[in-house]
Amino acid sequence: QRRSFRWLVHREAVLDLFTCVSQVAVSSGAPGLDLEWKMDKAFDLRGGVLCDPVGSGKTATMLGLVLHDRSAHEWEYKVNDAARDLFKDSWMTANATLVICPNHVHEQWVREAENFFYAEAFIVLPIRTANELRVAAPQLKILTESTSVGEKPFIVVVALSVLKETEYSELLSPGNSDLKGWLQGQESWQRGL
């Protein structure tokens, strides 16, 4: 666990360059003539995937990383984060750690976050269904507006099956006026509660 934890802390602090390539071609209207353009965009990429064997303490290691990140208060990378600058008007940041896990380990995550570390080390919000996500929306909205440092880390543990539910797709649909209101900061996102 110590080796994995050190690797995770290192991956949080290191920037790797990731290049995204977009290419589009459209007809010009003239026979045999297409217009084509290509764009390369570089992003700073942090983090990684922990793939230790079963039973090696991955959950506890990740919870330790959450506590470590929270105690660091502020990461000082001394670099320009190209992705943050590019998407600053469309990204929503939350004062929480999101864990998406398979259904069969969802309860393990919740249980370990609530009991493994010292009493009440984390605030845990378990979400098992799209309906629970809808009900939790006001609380999640507060997490996007709060930037308090020094509070207990907030962990949102979502079962993977939520992302496959029809209700989840409808919830995130661009046509969902509730979602538009929520993203614009309106208080009207409590329909259905």
Image (tube, grey):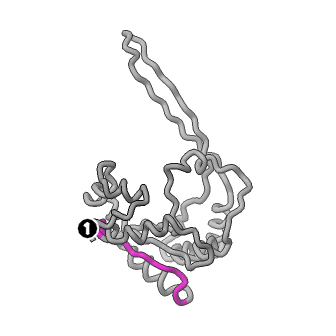
Please say whether residue 85 is visible from this viewpoint. yes
Q: Nearer the viewer, residue 138 or 53?
A: 138
Indicate yes or no whether the magenta region holds residue 129.
yes
In the rendered image, the residue lying farthest to the right is 78
Please say whether residue 56 is visible from this viewpoint. no
Where does label 1 land, which residue? Answer: 192
Q: Nearer the viewer, residue 3 or 28?
A: 28
| Residue found at x 65% / y 50% | 81
User: Which quarter of the figure has residue 169?
Assistant: bottom left
* Quadrant of the snapshot with the C terminus: bottom left
| Residue found at x 53% / y 69% | 146
Q: Nearer the viewer, residue 42 or 108?
A: 42
How far across and down, in percent of the image, does residue 108 sit? 42, 79
How far across and down, in percent of the image, does residue 174 sit? 33, 49
How far across and down, in percent of the image, does residue 23 sit? 48, 30
Q: Nearer the viewer, residue 130 or 179?
A: 179
| Residue found at x 74% / y 55% | 78
* Quadrant of the snapshot with the N terminus: bottom right
Relative to 21, 175 lies left or right: left
Indicate yes or no whether the magenta region holds residue 27.
no
Relative to 144, 160 lies left or right: left
Which residue range is magenta in the image?
Answer: 119-131
At label 1, the amino acid type is Gly
| Residue found at x 61% / y 41% | 42
As helix, strand or loop, the secondary structure at mark 1 comes to: loop
In the rendered image, the residue lying farthest to the top is 31
How far across and down, in percent of the image, does residue 73 sit? 66, 71
Characterize the local packing of mark 1: few (<14), some (14-19) or many (20 or more) Cα atoms within 10 angstroms.
Answer: few
